[in-house]
Image (tube, rainbow, N blue to C red):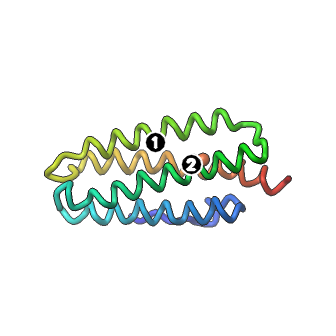
Amino acid sequence: MRYELTKELETGNAIIDREHKELFRAVNALMDACSKGQGRAAIEPTIKFLLDYVNKHFSHEEELQQKNKYPNIIAHKQFHVTYTRKLRDIVNAIPAAGPTVSDLSTLNQHIAVLVTHIRTEDKKVGAFLNGK
Ligand SMILES: [Fe+2]
């Protein structure tokens, strides 16, 4: 399965949407790397890229919210912190021999949480920014 920024996931903010697209590309790259049955070392660069990109993107979103005085910024930021921490824990748990089926399932479930966050919370941010 490939993650894709479908129309219903668009927030209407060009920066956020572009970064979400890039984020999905990073997730797909990691999933592809994981599906090759390689050890952890081989997938390490895609893990690192994803973690870095998530951090960068969340900071951009928070800056946008800060600058525009988005009313729900505290809760949104809190989600970002918790989400990033759990994502880091999940990828850190991948053993040297490579991801197990259960690792992949945990990872996919956590990506699904992000997709839901985009569909609900990020869309609210997009609507707010567009209404300004
Ligand atoms: Fe967000």
Name the residue rendered at 48%, 40% in the picture.
83
Name the residue rendered at 63%, 39% in the picture.
76
**Image location (x, y in percent) of residue 117:** 58, 46
Q: Quadrant of residue 42?
A: bottom left
Q: Note whether 63 is above or below 81 in the view shown.
A: below
In the image, which disc is placed on residue 58? 2
Q: Secondary structure at mark 1?
A: helix
Q: Note whether 81 is above or below 2 in the view shown.
A: above
Q: Are marks 1 and 2 in contact (CB under 8 Å)?
A: yes
Q: Note whether 71 is above or below 39 in the view shown.
A: above
Residues 70 and 59: in front is 59
Q: In this figure, which residue is indicated by the disc labeled 1? A: 84
Quadrant in which the N terminus is drawn: bottom left
Q: Quadrant of residue 21?
A: bottom right
**Image location (x, y in percent) of residue 111:** 44, 50
Near mark 1 (Cα within 10 A), the count class, few <14, some 14-19 or many ≥20, is: some
Q: Note whether 39 is above or below 72 in the view shown.
A: below
Name the residue rendered at 27%, 56% in the picture.
44
Amino acid bearing label 1? Thr
Kindly report the distance in space between the C-alpha atoms of the residues bearing marks 1 and 2.
9 Å
Amino acid bearing label 2? Phe
